[in-house]
Image: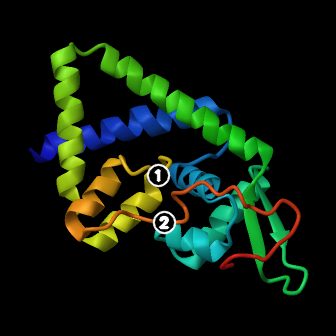
């Protein structure tokens, strides 16, 4: 079981992340940078502190992610006029394009793999994956962390939300999972920098 689990984890990582990242054409893009980019995409606007909390990393790591994404032209940093230490982070147009491209490439790659499977096996795999996810996370904190990293727009039907309902009696409500339409373009307060 251990070897199979390890092989499965590596196969998923290789086919749905590594290969996809090669396809986006951004030099030096890593799975960690992609996670940060996708989190900011969902959040709309946020500070380094928000990014650290949503990703479950240190403030220093989130700051490095933001700097690397900014260097690649994927992120825009807007400093607070009253306190230059605080800055709002949001995706550039190119950053949003990369997130969309990754989602398309990942979906296409997964669809191609599933299309090679007989229908019964495909449905059995999808059912087993949903059951695995449901049973893999038992406490509310782990479910909240998963929700913050899942990279899928939040909905009440989401398997993570269903886990939360079953385990805690309430659904997840994380700002990074709900796309924000009120992200300031040219001003506003800087959130949790």
Q: Residue at x 76, y 57 (%)?
A: 70
Of residues 146 and 22, the one nearer the viewer is 146
Q: Quadrant of the C terminus?
A: bottom right
Q: In this figure, which residue is indicated by the disc labeled 2? A: 174
Q: Residue at x 32, y 41 (%)?
A: 10
Which mark is on residue 50? Answer: none
Q: Quadrant of the N terminus?
A: top left
Q: Residue at x 34, y 21 (%)?
A: 113
In terms of image quadrants, where is residue 39? bottom right
In terms of image quadrants, where is residue 144? bottom left
| Residue 38 sits above or below residue 119 on the image | below
Q: Give the CA separation, mark 1 to mark 2.
A: 9 Å
Q: In this figure, which residue is indicated by the disc labeled 1? A: 154
Q: Which percent across, then down, holds residue 103?
A: 54, 35
Q: Does the CB distance between marks 1 and 2 fall below 8 Å?
A: yes
In terms of secondary structure, where does tag 2 sit? Answer: loop
């Amino acid at each position: 079981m251990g070897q199979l689990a390890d092989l499965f984890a590596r196969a998923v990582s290789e086919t749905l992340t590594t290969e996809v990242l090669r396809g986006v054409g951004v030099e030096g893009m890593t799975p960690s940078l992609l996670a940060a980019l996708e989190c900011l995409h969902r959040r709309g606007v946020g500070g380094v502190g928000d990014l650290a909390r949503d990703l479950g990393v240190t403030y220093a790591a989130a700051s490095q992610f933001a700097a690397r994404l900014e260097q690649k032209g994927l992120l825009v940093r807007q400093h607070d006029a009253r306190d230059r230490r605080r800055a709002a982070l949001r995706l550039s147009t190119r950053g949003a394009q990369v997130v969309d491209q990754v989602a398309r490439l990942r979906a296409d790659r997964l669809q191609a793999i599933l299309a090679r499977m007989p229908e019964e096996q495909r449905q059995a795999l999808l059912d087993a994956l949903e059951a695995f996810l449901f049973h893999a996370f038992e406490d509310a904190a782990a479910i909240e962390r998963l929700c913050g990293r899942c990279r899928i727009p939040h909905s009440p039907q989401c398997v993570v939300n269903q886990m939360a309902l079953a385990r805690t009696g309430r659904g997840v409500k994380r700002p990074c999972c709900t796309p924000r339409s009120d992200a300031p373009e040219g001003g506003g307060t800087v959130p949790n920098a």
